Image: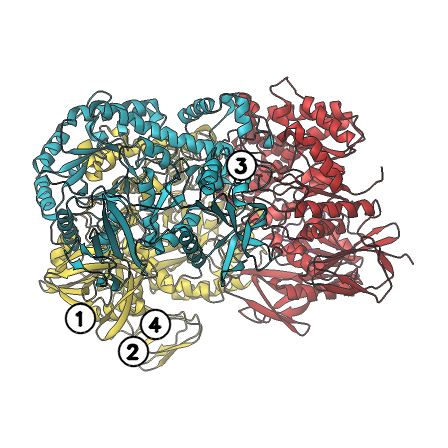
Chain colours: A cyan, B yellow, C red
C-alpha cells in the first residue's frame, strides 16, 4: 500500500443496522477514504457489568474494515462511562464547580480521580489491545476522546492534598507559596485544604480570592486527567509497543496543559472546529501550537466537519471550496492527515445536525460528498510527497499554560485582558507577513531562533530568565510586553521592581500600570507613524534601554511606551501597551528584518503562504482566503502538485477564490 | 336569571376582615359583577393537619355570594400546599432543574408525583364537592390554578421509569428510540435512567445532549401534572357530575401540552396577560389557540387585569379604553366570559401592586372602577345574544407541542429559531387580512378546511403525513416551511432525504440547510416583488414541484426558495426560508384566494375584525387598535349591539380610538 | 504628642519577614505616617486550635510600632475564621442564598448565628483586650472588618424563628403582618417557617414572592451580624472601657442597617473606594451618610487606596493629585482621619494588584509615595486645627434602610427604580448648590431643620407621619416624591388612598401609578421652564394642595405633577415623577430659598465647597474637581491653612486642577 496522508474520520457503524455497513464501504471507496476512527463511544456497548464484555460486533466491524483495506485509528471508548457504572459506583460521576454532584449523562463525565473509573478504563484499554493488537491496519491508538473539564468531588479533594504534599513537602512551604498570611488562611494540616471552587475561594469561574490555590488546582486537574491518559497509554503500550498512541486535542484548550501532555504522546492529533467568524490567522495559530507541541513534528488533523457543525449559535454551511481550503491549511501548517467527524450522520441526539461525509439522504449525490471525493482523489495523487516535511522557523512565539492560568486568575488590572488576544495580535502580524513561526513552551530551547516573542510573559518560571538572558546576550532578539516578569511560578510578585528577573535584560523599570476603560485611549508615534493604544499602559523608566516612542497623553505623556535594550550582542524590546494591528505589523517587520528573518514568500493580502521542507525540497502552500481571484508571481521555478502545472520565475500563479496551489520548488 | 356573559373574577375575601365583605357586595352590584372565582389559594386555611379541616369561613363566603346572586367559579385551592405539609412531608416539595431541593414557599410548589400531594389534593377536592356541590350558583369547578413548572425529584425519577416502561415495553425499544448507541448511552436496566436536567443531560434549560430523553421528560412532566388535574377532576365529578370542570390555562405555555389536556377539560379557560409591547395579532393568536383546543367551542376568559400588572419590567397602566378593547377582543375570538384578576387589590406580598377592580383606596371613584362598571353595563345589555356563537374557518394553522419541544431542543441549526416566531409570522398575515383561522392539533381532522398551514413542521408524527396526503390529494392546499419533515416522534431523523414523509406531497428534496447569522441575509423575487430573507435557508431540488422563486445570492443563488406541487387535486407549498411580514401577507393572500378563502370583512389597517356566527346570524367584531379614529364602510345592513345604531350598506362605521363595534348582520 | 488627624492605614507585617519591618518604620517616618491598623486578618495565625494561642509575633509588632511612636487601630481579626475551625466545626461556614453550603475559603465566611463562631470570636477579642489593653497607643478597637453578607443555614433558620417569636409574640400576629392568607401561606407553627431564599420565596436575589418574610430576614440578618459585633464590643469594653470601639463600614451598604448599628459604635469609620466613574457628589453623599450616622459627629476615614484598586473592571490609576483631593473631600465632609489600605503591597492572592503606600518595588522613589508624603506633611502642619469641627445644616435628607429594602423587594411598578438613584438625584442638587445637608434616619429629630427631603418615602414607619406633621405644621418644609406613604413597616399597603398617612400633610390623593418603559417619556413646565420626566408618573388629585405643574402628555395630560400644600405654618411638596437634574436643581433652590437656607459659598461649577465649624470658627473646603484651574472670589477675610496665604474679601482664590484650599475664615 502506498504511503499517503490518511483520509477518513470517525465512523460509528454501531449506530446503524449491519445492512448499511456495506453501503458505507462502497461510498468510502468512491470518496477515497482510507482510514476510519472506530470505537469512540462504545464503552456501554462493550461492557455490561464489571466482568462482562461484548466484543462480537466490534470484531465484525474490524473484519469489515480490514477486508476493505481501511486503516484504523482505534479509540478506547472511555470518554463516557456506562450508565450501569454510574448507578453502581456514583463516585465515577463528576462534581461541578458549584458543588453540584452530577448524575449519569452527557460525556466527559468521569471523575479523573475515581478509582473505579481508573480501574475499568485501563482494563478496557488493555482488553482492546489484547484483542485487536494484532491487526496491522491499526495506525494509532486514540485514547479516550477530547479529554477535558474539571471535577471538584471528594475523590479529587483527597487526591489534591496528596498532590500538594508531594509538591510542597511541608505545610509551611505551602503556606508560603500560597501567601496564606493574607486573609488569615494559614493551614495547619493538609486535611484543612479544600478544592477551590464556588463553595470556597471562587466567586466566579475565573475569579478567585486565592490565586495560588486555584493555580495549583488547574495544574492538579490537568495532571489528574493526564494520569487517566497515561494509565491507558501504558496498558496499550504494554501489549502493542509498536503502535503509536495519541488522543485528540482541541487547540488552545485552557483546562489542559498540552505542552506537558505532549511529552507523553507519540503523535499529536487535534480537532479543528473554527467558528465561521474566526479569521484564518487564528486557525493557523492553533495549527502552529499543535505542531509546536512536539517540536515541529507533523500532527494528525483528527477531526473537522466536512460541511457544518451543529453546536454553534449559527451553523453556517461551509461554502463550496471551504472544506478543501481549510484541509490544506492544516497540511500547510504541519498536518499529515485529513480526517473528519464523521462518516455517516447520526439520526438522533445532539449531533444529528452535525455534518458528515454521508448525509441523512444516504447517497453520493450531494455537494458535500462530491467535495470530499475530489479532495480524496487529490490526496491519493499526492501520495507521500509531502509526508513528514517540516516547517523551518527562525522566529518563535512563547506560549505557556501556567502563564495563561495565572494571568487570567489575577484580580486586576483589567477585565478585558485575555492572553489569547495578546498572542493573536503578535501572531497575526507574523502570519500576515508570511513568517514561519514556531509556538514553543517555556521548556523548549531557544538556540535555533533569531527572534523570540513572549506576549504578556506575566510569570517567570525558574530558569526562564536565565535562558532568555543567554539567548539575548548571544545575539537573539527578545520581544515582550506590558505586565511581564511580575510573578514567580507561585504567582507571587517578585519584589524590587517590575519586570522582576527580566529587568536587566530589558533595561527598564516599570513603576505603575494603568488600566484604561474602553472609552479611554492613548497614542504614540514611532518611526514616523501614529498609533493608537489602550487597555494597559505600563509607566516605565529607562535604566539601560533606549526609549523608541513615548505616550502622547495623560499624566505620563512623554514617558516611554516602547523600549529597546542592547544586552550582550542581542536586543530586548518592551511594548508597554496594547496597540493596534497596524503597529504590530510595522514593529515586528522591523524587528525581524534587523535579524534577517525573511518571509517565506512575498506577502499578498488575503493569501496565506506557508513553507514545509522535506530533505532539500521546499513545498510552498498558497491558500487564497480572498472572496476573489488572487495572483502571485512565481519567485522560483516549480510545479503545482495539485494540477501538475509548471511555473517559471515571473509566471503568474492564479488562485481562484478558495484556491490552493501546492508549489513544489525545483531544487537548484 | 338571564343568561349572559359571566362578568367578575378572582375574589379573595379571606384576605380581608368580614366588615369589608358587604362593601364588596355593594361595589359588585355597582359594577355589574355577577360571578366570582373563590377559594383559589385557601388550602392552608382550610386544612391545618392531615385530618382537620376548617370550612366555616368558606361557608360564610358561599352564603354571602349566593345571597348576593353571584355565580361562583369554585377553585380547589391546590395550587399551593400548606406549610405544615411541606414540613411534615418534604417529598411534596419540588426539586429544581439544577437539582436544588426546594423548601416551602411561593406557589406551583408541589411535586406532581408526590403520593402525599396526590392524596391530599384529591381529598380536598372531594371534600369541597361534597360540602358545596349543592350550591346551584357554582358554574364551574376550577381545579388548582395555572398549573405549570417541572420537578426533578426522586419521586419523579421513579415515576418516569414507570412511564417509560409503559411506553416502550422493553429497554431495547427505549435504547433504539433514544439512539443510545450515540455517546455510549446504552441502558441495561430501567433503574439506570435518571431525570434529564442540569445534573445529567442538560447544559442549560433548553440545551440537552439527548433530545430523546429530554423530549420524553417533557411529555412525562405534562402527563404527571395532567394526572394531578385528573385526580381532582374525578373527585369532583363523582360528586357533582352536572358541574363542568376547568382549570385556567396560560396561552402558549410550553411546559404543558394543552392539546392533550383539553381532552380532559369540560370547558377551556385561560388567563390573558399580554405584555404592553405584544402586538394585537399575538394576543389574537393566543385566543385562537384556546378556542382551537376544543375544536372551536367558546372558552372562558378567566383572568385579565383591569388596569395594571405588577410582575412585568415596566408595569404600564392600561390606558382608558384598553381594558374594554382587550375584553371584546377575547369575545371576538371565542370567549363567553370576561373575568378579572382580581376583585380587590391585596395589601401585602408580591401582587399588592397588581391592579384590581376595587383599588387600595377602596372607593368606586376611580377611573378603573368606572371603566369596569361601563363594561359591566354593556355586557348586561348584550345578555345572551352572542353566547355560544362559533367562528367559521376555512383556514387552519397546525400547532403541535411535541414539535415545539423537539424543534427547540435540537442542537442547531440556529439559536434564533423559535417555533412561536414562525407561527406568529404566518398567523399575523392571516390576522391582517381578516381571515378566520382555526389553530388545530396534529390529531384534529382536516376535512373542513381548504388551506392548512404548518410552519416548521419539524416532526412528522405517525399518521400525520397520511392525513395531509389525503387532504391535499382531495383538493386542499398545504403550506409548510424549512426544516419540515425531518424527524419522527422520537426526534429521530427520517433518512432517505428531507422532508422525509412529506417529500412526495411537496415534490421536493432538501439537500442542505444553511443557518445565517443576523448579519447575513439573502433575498428573492416572487410575483414581481422583491423580498428579504434569512435565518434559515433550505437548499432544495425540485422533484415534482415547480419553483416559484429562487435565491438571489450566495452559492445557492438561482436555486428554488419557494415551491408549489400539484398533488392529486390539491397543492402543497414549501417556503424554504424565513422571509418578512410583507412576503407572508402577499403569499398567503394569493394561496387563500386560489382556494376561495375570503376575509370576513375588507381589511383596514389597525382594525381587527373577526366573525362569530350563531345559527344563521353573523356577529362582526370591529376593534380599533389605531391611536386614531378609523372608518369602515358597512358591507351589509346591520346593528351595532353596543349602541343600537343601525347601518345600511355603504354607511360609515366610525370607530374611535380603542373603539369597538359589535355588528350584528341583518339576516338576508 | 500633638493631637492631629491620624494618618496611616492597614499594616500587615505578618505577611513579611521581620527584616522588612524596620524598613517599613523608616518609610513611615518619611511619609508622616503616625497610625497603623493592625491584626485585621490574623485569626488563623493567632489561634491554632480551640485552646492554643500564639501572640508572640503580634507582641513583637506591638512593641515595634510603640517604639516608633505609631498609634494603633487594633483589629480583632475575626473577619475570617481559621481553616481548622471550618474543618472541625462546619457549622461556622455560611450557606449561600441558593442553599449552597460553603467550604473554607475567602473572607466574610462565618455564619453569624454559629455558636462556635460566636464563642471563639468573642474569646479572641477578650484575649486581645487583656493582652494589649494597656498599650496607650491604641486609639480604637476595630472589630472584625467590613462586616457583610448573608447566611441561610440551619443555625440561621432556627435563630430566625426565635427572632420572629420575640418580634411578633404570636403566630397569628405574624400571619397578619406577612399577609399569609395570600397564596395560602398560613403558618400554624413557628417551625414551619423557613429562610426566604432561592429555595423558598425568592426567584432571584432581589425578587421575592413574600415581601414581608424577606424584609424581616434582612432585618434579622443585619441584627445577627450586629450581634456578632456586640459580642466583641462588650468583650473589649469590659477590659478597656476607655478605648473607643468601631468597625469599618462601607457607605451605602444595603445588607446592614448602619443607622441601627451606629447606636452601638463609639465612633463611625468607613472605607471609601469610589469607582473612577462615580461623580464627586456621589462620594460626598456617602461621606454625609457616615457623618449622619452619629448625628454629625466626625468619623474616621479608615481605608482608601493611595493609588489603585484591583477589583474593579478597569483599575484606573488615581491621577496625580487625585488621592490628595479625595482625602480632603473626606475631611471636608466630616472625617478626622486619613487612612489607607494598605501600607505595603502584598505579593500574593487577590489583592496583590491593590495599591499601597509602599509598592512592590519597595523604595520611596515612587510617585505614589511622594504624594503620600506630601499629604503627610500637610496634615502634620494642620495639627488639630480642624479636629472635631462640625457641619451646621439646615437641610436634611431622610434615608431609611427598611424603606430601601422594602421598595426594592416590591414586585412592580418598575424594574429600573432604585432608591439610591432617587437619593442621588436630590442630593446632587443640594451638592451643586453648596448646601450643607445632613443625612438623617427615620429616628432622628427634625427640630433643627428648615427643609426635610424624603425621596420615595415608600414606607411610613410608626410615628414617622406624626413627626413630619409636627415639623411641617410648625413651619418646616417637607419634600417627598412618587410612591411615598404607600406601606407600613410590614410592607402592607395603607388602604384608603395613597399617600396613606402623609395624605393630609401633602393635601393630595394619588389614584394611580404609571411605570414608563425607557422609550416612553412625559414632560411638564414649571416656573417658565420645560422639564422632561419619566420612569414613574403618579396620577394625583389635589385635595388641599395647589398644583404647581401638570403633565404635558398621555391620558393624564393636564393633571398635576408637582404640588405644594400649606399645612399649619409650613409647606409640603410632592414630586410625582422622576425628572432630570435640571429640575431638581431649580426646584430645590427655590424651596430652600423660601426657607432662607443659603449655600455655604457662592457656587462655582465643578468646585465642591463645604463648611465645617469649630466653636465660632468656620473652615471652608474648596475642592477643585475641574480638569482646569478654577477661580473663586473670597467673600470674607481668611487664610488658606495649607499654604498660609491670606485673603481679603474680593481677592481671587485660584484653585489649580485638583487643587484644595482649606479656608479658615477670620472671625468677625
Query: Are discs 1 and 3 less than 8 Å apart at CB?
Result: no
Looking at the rendered structure, whether the residues under marks 1 and 2 are on a common chain is answered as yes
C633 with respect to B503 (left or right): right
Check residue C351 for magenta coloring.
Answer: no
Picture residue at 21% right of the left edge, 49% below the top: A306
Closest to the observer, A72 or A357: A72
How far apart in space, not on screen, are marks 1 and 3 (Cα)?
A: 70 Å
Q: Which residue is mark 3?
A: A209
Query: Are discs 4 and 2 less than 8 Å apart at CB?
Result: no
Q: Which residue is mark 4?
A: B663
Q: Quadrant of the N terminus of chain B?
A: bottom left
Element on which disc 2 rests: loop
Q: Looking at the rendering, which quadrant does residue C247 occupy?
A: top right
Element on which disc 4 rests: strand
Extent of the magenta region: C454-463
Closest to the observer, C235 or A309: A309
C403 with respect to A17 (left or right): right
Q: Looking at the rendering, which quadrant does residue B123 occupy?
A: top left
Q: Which residue is mark 1?
A: B594
Query: Which numbered disc, 4 or 2, marks the residue closer to the eye?
Result: 2
Spot the residue most to the top. C51
Q: Earlier in the sequence, mark 1 or mark 2?
A: 1
Q: Which residue is mark 2?
A: B635
Amino acid at each position: 500500500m502506498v504511503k499517503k496522508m490518511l483520509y477518513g474520520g470517525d465512523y460509528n457503524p454501531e449506530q446503524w443496522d449491519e445492512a448499511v455497513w456495506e453501503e458505507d464501504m462502497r461510498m468510502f471507496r468512491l470518496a477515497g477514504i482510507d482510514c476510519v476512527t472506530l470505537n469512540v463511544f462504545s464503552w456501554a456497548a462493550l461492557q455490561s457489568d464489571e466482568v462482562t464484555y461484548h466484543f462480537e460486533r466490534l470484531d465484525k466491524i474490524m473484519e469489515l474494515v480490514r477486508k476493505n483495506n481501511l486503516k484504523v485509528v482505534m479509540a478506547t471508548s472511555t470518554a463516557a462511562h456506562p450508565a450501569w457504572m454510574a448507578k453502581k459506583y456514583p463516585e465515577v460521576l463528576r462534581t461541578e464547580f458549584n458543588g453540584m454532584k452530577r448524575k449519569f449523562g452527557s460525556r466527559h463525565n468521569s471523575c479523573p480521580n475515581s478509582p473505579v473509573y481508573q480501574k475499568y478504563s485501563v482494563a478496557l484499554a488493555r482488553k482492546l489491545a489484547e484483542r485487536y493488537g494484532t491487526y496491522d491496519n491499526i495506525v494509532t491508538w486514540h485514547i479516550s476522546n477530547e479529554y477535558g473539564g474539571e471535577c471538584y468531588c471528594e475523590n479529587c479533594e483527597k487526591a489534591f492534598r496528596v498532590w500538594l504534599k508531594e509538591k510542597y513537602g511541608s505545610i509551611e512551604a505551602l503556606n508560603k507559596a500560597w501567601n496564606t498570611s493574607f486573609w488569615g488562611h494559614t493551614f495547619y494540616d493538609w486535611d484543612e485544604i479544600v478544592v477551590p471552587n464556588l463553595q470556597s475561594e471562587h466567586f466566579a469561574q475565573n475569579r478567585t480570592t486565592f490565586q495560588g490555590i486555584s493555580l495549583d488546582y488547574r495544574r492538579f486537574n490537568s495532571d489528574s486527567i493526564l494520569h487517566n491518559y497515561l494509565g491507558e497509554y501504558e496498558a496499550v503500550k504494554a501489549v502493542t509497543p509498536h503502535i503509536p498512541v495519541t488522543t485528540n486535542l482541541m487547540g488552545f484548550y485552557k483546562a489542559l496543559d498540552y505542552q506537558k501532555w505532549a511529552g507523553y504522546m507519540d503523535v499529536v492529533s487535534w480537532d479543528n472546529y473554527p467558528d465561521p467568524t474566526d479569521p484564518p490567522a487564528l486557525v493557523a495559530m492553533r495549527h502552529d501550537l499543535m505542531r509546536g507541541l512536539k517540536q515541529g513534528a507533523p500532527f494528525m488533523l483528527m477531526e473537522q466537519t466536512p460541511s457544518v457543525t451543529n453546536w454553534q449559535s449559527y451553523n453556517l454551511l461551509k461554502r463550496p471550496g471551504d472544506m478543501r481550503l481549510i484541509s490544506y491549511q492544516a497540511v500547510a501548517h504541519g498536518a499529515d492527515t485529513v480526517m473528519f467527524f464523521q462518516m455517516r450522520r447520526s439520526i438522533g441526539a445532539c449531533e444529528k445536525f452535525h455534518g458528515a461525509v454521508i448525509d441523512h439522504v444516504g447517497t453520493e449525490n450531494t455537494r458535500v460528498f462530491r467535495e470530499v471525493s475530489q479532495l480524496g482523489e487529490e490526496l491519493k495523487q499526492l501520495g507521500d510527497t509531502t509526508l513528514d516535511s517540516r516547517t523551518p522557523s527562525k522566529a518563535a512565539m512563547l506560549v505557556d499554560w501556567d502563564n495563561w492560568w495565572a494571568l487570567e486568575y489575577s484580580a486586576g488590572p483589567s477585565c478585558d485582558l485575555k492572553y489569547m488576544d495578546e498572542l493573536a495580535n503578535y501572531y497575526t502580524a507574523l502570519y500576515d507577513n508570511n513568517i514561519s513561526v514556531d509556538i514553543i513552551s517555556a521548556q523548549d530551547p531557544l538556540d535555533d531562533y533569531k527572534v523570540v516573542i513572549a506576549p504578556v510573559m506575566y510569570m517567570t518560571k525558574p530558569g526562564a530568565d536565565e535562558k532568555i538572558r543567554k539567548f539575548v546576550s548571544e545575539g537573539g532578539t527578545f520581544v515582550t510586553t506590558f505586565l511581564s516578569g511580575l510573578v514567580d511560578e507561585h504567582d507571587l510578585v517578585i519584589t524590587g521592581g517590575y519586570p522582576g528577573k527580566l529587568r536587566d535584560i530589558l533595561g527598564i523599570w516599570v513603576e505603575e500600570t494603568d488600566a484604561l476603560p474602553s472609552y479611554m485611549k492613548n497614542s504614540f508615534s514611532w518611526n514616523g507613524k501614529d498609533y493608537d493604544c489602550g487597555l494597559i499602559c505600563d509607566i516605565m523608566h529607562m535604566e539601560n534601554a533606549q526609549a523608541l516612542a513615548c505616550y502622547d497623553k495623560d499624566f505620563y505623556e512623554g514617558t516611554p511606551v516602547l523600549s529597546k535594550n542592547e544586552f550582550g550582542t542581542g536586543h530586548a524590546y518592551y511594548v508597554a501597551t496594547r496597540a493596534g494591528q497596524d503597529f504590530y505589523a510595522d514593529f515586528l517587520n522591523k524587528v525581524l528584518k534587523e535579524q534577517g528573518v525573511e518571509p517565506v514568500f512575498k506577502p499578498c493580502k488575503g493569501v496565506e503562504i506557508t513553507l514545509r521542507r522535506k530533505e532539500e525540497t521546499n513545498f510552498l502552500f498558497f491558500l487564497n482566503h480572498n472572496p476573489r481571484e488572487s495572483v502571485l508571481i512565481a519567485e522560483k521555478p516549480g510545479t503545482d502538485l495539485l494540477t501538475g502545472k509548471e511555473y517559471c520565475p515571473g509566471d503568474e500563479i492564479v488562485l481562484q477564490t478558495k484556491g490552493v496551489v501546492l508549489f513544489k520548488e525545483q531544487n537548484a
